[in-house]
Amino acid sequence: MTAAPVHRATVATFAAFGASGLAFASLFARVPQIRDQLHLSPGALGLTLLAASGGAVLALVLSGPVVARHGSRRVVAVSAVLFAVGLATAAVGATGDVALTVVGLVALGLGTGAWDVAMNLQGTVLERHLRRSIMSRLHAGFSVGSVAGALLGTAMVALRVPVRVHLVGIALVVAVFVPIFGRAFLPDGAASSVAAPRTGFAAWREPRTILIGLFVLAFTMAEGAGHDWIVIAAVDDHEAPAALGTLAFATFVAAMTAGRWCGPWLLDRWGRVAVLRLLALTGLAGTALFVFAPGLPLALVGALLWGVGTALGFPVGMSAAAEDPSAAAGRVSVVATIGYCAFLAGPPLLGLLGDRLTVLRALLVIAALFGLGALLSGALRPVGAR
């Protein structure tokens, strides 16, 4: 295949990741306003956010065979539209209808689960064509979109733009542009002629795949907690104004973006295991600093280190799962499903702990998960290096 189609597919995949980050950050930047409009306690907010996580996990469980059958190009287009419909529905419900908000979050979750597996699979296709690691930079596209969404959210809060207007506008952007990006994706099977792709659920019986999934779960919960709770903790516990609380979120995602952009250089120089262990310890230190900081300035430093720590866990997990092209779709689906269980368990767990301990103290769970990630990082060693 010539370089031009691969380059177009790389740009399109980066854009698809970026659009996902933009959409998610836009939603999470408005969580305090959604909470206030729906009159939710931390525990009730966690259970409400569980609707999106439940939809995502259901889609992830089923997406391996679906993506293998229909291809990442088609699945990304359809799932992005479903995500947009869910986001718009949740935005309308956030004006005071909890049930409608939950329905929208379920649809949003279903869309994002399939979208995530499909674009990550396209990333592994690109890596095999390019013969080098680019997955973390594709995930940096998600983080770039998240930074843009967080900063846009900060502006929307400062300008007092209604949640419904803001999020419906984002939904329209996703529904129009992501299917256009997807047209440039490469065929999933074109990168390897070694064997016909294997589909089904056989990867659930593979110990290495399960360990990679548990590693990704630890990092995904750390990342998800940053998205779900960092603004709440900054506003409620560090007593930051709403706009500065959103700035803590922007600091977190900006640090994660920088870590992902530098990821290929770090991984090529020192290897997966050493880099991931170092980042896990960095995230542990950053989370602890965010929790115990005596004021907002040091908490922002903690948010920065927390973001750096989360940077490579998910993308390197996806690359490790997809080393064998013939089993990539199934394994990526399994690892993503286990990883996204963090989004299923995280919001209610941290919300219920927040009811008892404050949201800020509940985030000490994230420090423990970074420690678990450091212990499991050996599972991601390349198979040929064992």
Image (cartoon, rainbow, N blue to C red):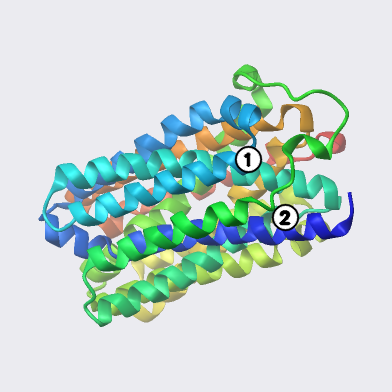
Mark 2 lies on residue:
9
Query: At 21% across and 70% down in the image, what residue appears?
Result: 162
Question: Circle 2 sits in a helix, a strand or a loop, which is it?
Answer: helix
Query: At 23% across and 51% down in the image, what residue appears?
Result: 354
Amino acid type of the residue tagged 1 in the rendering: Ser
324 lies above or below 18:
above
Residue 370 placement (x, y as % from top left): 51, 50
Query: At 48% across and 70% down in the image, what residue appears?
Result: 147
- Report how far apart the C-alphas of labels 2 and 1 lie in the structure: 12 Å
Question: Circle 1 sits in a helix, a strand or a loop, which is it?
Answer: helix
Residue 304 placement (x, y as % from top left): 49, 71
Left or right, 136 with reference to 85: right
**Foreground residue, 316 or 60?**
60
Left or right, 72 with reference to 167: right
171 lies above or below 332:
below
Mark 1 lies on residue:
72
Q: Counting residues from the N terminus, which is met first, the one under dot 2 or under dot 1?
A: 2
Q: Which numbered marker is on residue 296?
A: none
Amino acid type of the residue tagged 2 in the rendering: Ala
Give the tally of numbered discs. Answer: 2
Residue 96 placement (x, y as % from top left): 11, 54
- Whether residue 55 can be seen here: yes
Estimate how packed mark 2 is, as few (under 14), some (14 to 19) or many (20 or more) residues with alpha carbons within 10 Å: many
- Whether residue 344 can be seen here: no
The C terminus lies in which quarter of the figure?
top right
Left or right, 157 with reference to 365: left
